[in-house]
Amino acid sequence: MSASSETPPISSAAKQQQSGGRFQSSETVALESLPTSTVGAFEQLDYACRSRAIPRAIALPGHYIAFRDAGGAEQVVEVGDQLVHLGRSRNAEIRIEDVHVSRRHAILTRRADAVRVLDDGSSTGTFVNGRLVIAANLADGDVVRLGTVSFTYLLIR
């Protein structure tokens, strides 16, 4: 995975497919111009979430989301519960301190070995591998972006 990832522009068709017209063209253009980087994303997590993170090298088998710290090292946070909220809210299990992340931005759901990401009515959208999604099944190595923060879904066996 590269230290920085550029997201391709959203097509007009993708913009039209958004439910309820939630994403306005001015918001989409503004979001497309945001800098995106996976390096340093770890520092955007709140203290409680950072304290639960471990280096990938010592992670036991399971479902994780991986963030890179400012030095480029990969830190992972386990997705242990069946329902994990991501956002700026103090109630989010994965709290991301980025002004481009909504309070209730996305939800990760887990059933057996399947993990799915759902947009939770965010104002800037949820992206998987550069595609704007409302809901998507995640595969090992998929890159998810909320606001300017990107992380990688990992299934460690």
Image (cartoon, rainbow, N blue to C red):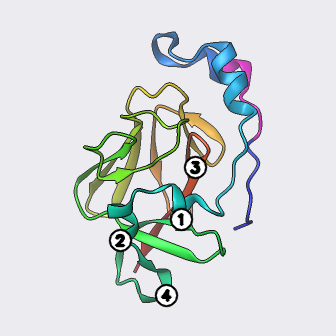
Report, in whole angstroms, how far the alpha carbon at label 3 lies from the one at label 1: 9 Å
Residue at the image position 50 percent from the left and 67 percent from the top: 66
**Residue identifier under label 3:** 149
Residues at circles 1 and 2 in contact by the CB criterion of under 8 Å? no
Residue at the image position 53 percent from the left and 31 percent from the top: 125
Q: Which dot, 2 or 3, sits closer to the camera?
A: 2
**Residue identifier under label 4:** 57
From the viewer's perspective, tell me whether residue 62 is left or right of residue 149: left
From the viewer's perspective, tell me whether residue 124 is left or right of residue 58: right
**Residue identifier under label 2:** 51
Report, in whole angstroms, how far the alpha carbon at label 4 lies from the one at label 3: 22 Å
Q: Amino acid at mark 1?
A: Phe
Q: Which mark, by number, is residue 67? A: 1
Which region is colored magenta? 8-13
Task: State the SS at label 3.
Answer: strand
**For the stretch drawn in magenta, what is the main secondary structure?**
loop
Q: Amino acid at mark 2?
A: Ser
In the rendered image, residue 110, in percent from the top left (x then y), is placed at 29, 55
In the rendered image, residue 123, in percent from the top left (x then y), is placed at 50, 24
Of the image marks 4 and 2, the number of the one nearer the N terminus: 2
Residue 92 in the image: above or below residue 76: above
Of the image marks 4 and 3, the number of the one nearer the N terminus: 4
- Residue 81 seen: yes
Residues at circles 3 and 1 in contact by the CB criterion of under 8 Å? yes
Quadrant where the C terminus lies?
bottom left
Residue at the image position 55 percent from the left and 29 percent from the top: 124
- Residue 143 seen: no
Density class for disc 4 (Cα within 10 Å; few <14, some 14-19, many ≥20) is few
